[in-house]
Image (cartoon, rainbow, N blue to C red):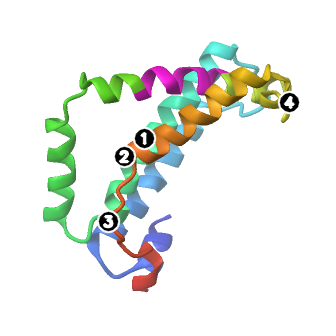
Amino acid sequence: MLIGGLWHGASWTFVLWGLYHGVLLVVYRWLAPDLGTRPLSPLARAFHQVFFFHLVCVGWMLFRAKTFHELSEFVAAFSRSPILEAGVIARLLFAAPVFVLEFAVYTRKDQLALLRLPWWLRVIVYFGMYWALLSTGRWTGEGFIYFQF
């Protein structure tokens, strides 16, 4: 992973990104020594997936930051963000059923679980996904990150 960070660029933030993800992989393998051989409860599996997903997302700040100063600004923005803002709560309330649906798709191995819902419930889910995407996105016209390479 460290070499992967160097491959992405000669910036220290990329090196730190590779190191972070390498350490994260080691920790993940250490915490789950019998990957696939010891079944976890559905609740434990969901917790592990959500927990490591968020750790990976935190690591992407390292990838996106051009300098350590910009990284510190990212971290500071998280500490200043109003968690209990009404829009954030609304998106979290919508995200919960989507996670439940996705978990049902995963555990039942049924890719069509959403299509089996009543039409009116599918409309609500699709509208909510569309709203969450539009309300959380940054639409500044910033170029795709790999265009800089």
Q: Which residue is mark 1?
A: 55
- Report crowding for label 2: few under 14, some 14 to 19, many 20 or more residues within 10 A (C-alpha): some
Query: Which of the numbered marks, if any, corresponds to residue 5?
Result: none
| Residue 64 point in image, percent of width and height | 34, 64
Query: Residue at coordinates 47% horizontally, 38% vertically from top-left?
Result: 132
Between disc 1 and disc 4, whose residue precedes?
A: 1
Query: Which of the numbered marks, if any, corresponds to residue 58?
Result: 2
| Residue 32 point in image, percent of width and height | 62, 31
Q: Are marks 2 and 1 in contact (CB under 8 Å)?
A: yes
Q: Above or below — where is 51 with respect to 21?
A: above
Q: Above or below — where is 102 with respect to 134?
A: above
Q: Which residue is mark 4?
A: 109
Q: Which residue in the rendered view is the most extreme toward the bottom?
A: 149
Q: Which residue is mark 3?
A: 140
Q: Above or below — where is 21 with respect to 117?
A: below
| Residue 149 point in image, percent of width and height | 43, 86
Query: Residue at coordinates 53% horizontally, 21% vertically from top-left?
Result: 96
Name the kind of residue labelled 3 in the image. Thr
Between disc 4 and disc 3, whose residue precedes?
A: 4
Q: Gap between marks 3 and 1, in whole Å? A: 26 Å
Range drawn in magenta: 91-100
Quadrant assignment, res 124: top right
Residue 67 in the magenta stretch? The answer is: no
Q: Callout 3: helix, strand or loop? A: loop
In the picture provided, is 95 more to the left or to the right than 149? right
